[in-house]
Image (cartoon, grey):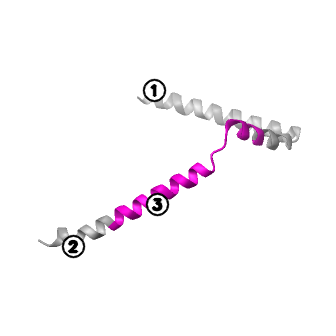
Amino acid sequence: MSTAIENAPVQTQTQNTTNRVANSNRRSQNETVLSDIEIAARVLAIRSSWDVNERLQRRRAADERFENLLDALQLTESAA
């Protein structure tokens, strides 16, 4: 009968730990938020370092991933 009373401190401690971790994660995520302009500037800086061959390879890979995505979506749609 005393198990509910004995478990109460453990549950409270677990809840406190969970809340502390959740708040910690929220703070760390908020500290690294970038604006769309900052992201675009970083993307442009990275892309400017690519030579023509690398750009072509990346474009082909992106096109292939897009085709695969469309195929997967069609399969999912036809299965539903």
Please, what is the three-letter code of the amino acid marked with disc 2?
Glu
In front: label 1 or label 2: 2
Asked whether the residues under the numbered discs 3 and 1 touch, taking CB atoms below 8 Å apart as contact, a structural biologist would say no
Please, what is the three-letter code of the amino acid marked with disc 1?
Ser
Marked residue nearer the N-terminal end (3 or 1) = 3
Q: Which residue is mark 1?
A: 78
User: x%, y% of residue 18?
Assistant: 40, 60
Quadrant for the N terminus in the image: bottom left
Mark 2 closeness class: few <14, some 14–19, many ≥20 residues within 10 Å: few
Tell me the number on the disc at residue 6.
Answer: 2
Q: Secondary structure at mark 2?
A: helix
Above or below, 51 against 71 in this view is: below
- Residue occupying the point 88% across, 37% down: 52
Q: Nearer the viewer, residue 67 or 29?
A: 29
Q: Secondary structure at mark 1?
A: helix
User: x%, y% of residue 45?
Assistant: 82, 42
- Residue occupying the point 24% across, 67% down: 8
The residues bearing labels 1 and 2 have C-alpha atoms spaced at a distance of 55 Å
Marked residue nearer the N-terminal end (1 or 2) = 2
Per the picture, the main secondary structure of the magenta-coloured stretch is helix
Mark 3 closeness class: few <14, some 14–19, many ≥20 residues within 10 Å: few
Whether residue 68 is in magenta: the answer is no
The residues bearing labels 2 and 3 have C-alpha atoms spaced at a distance of 24 Å
Which residues make up the magenta segment? 13-42
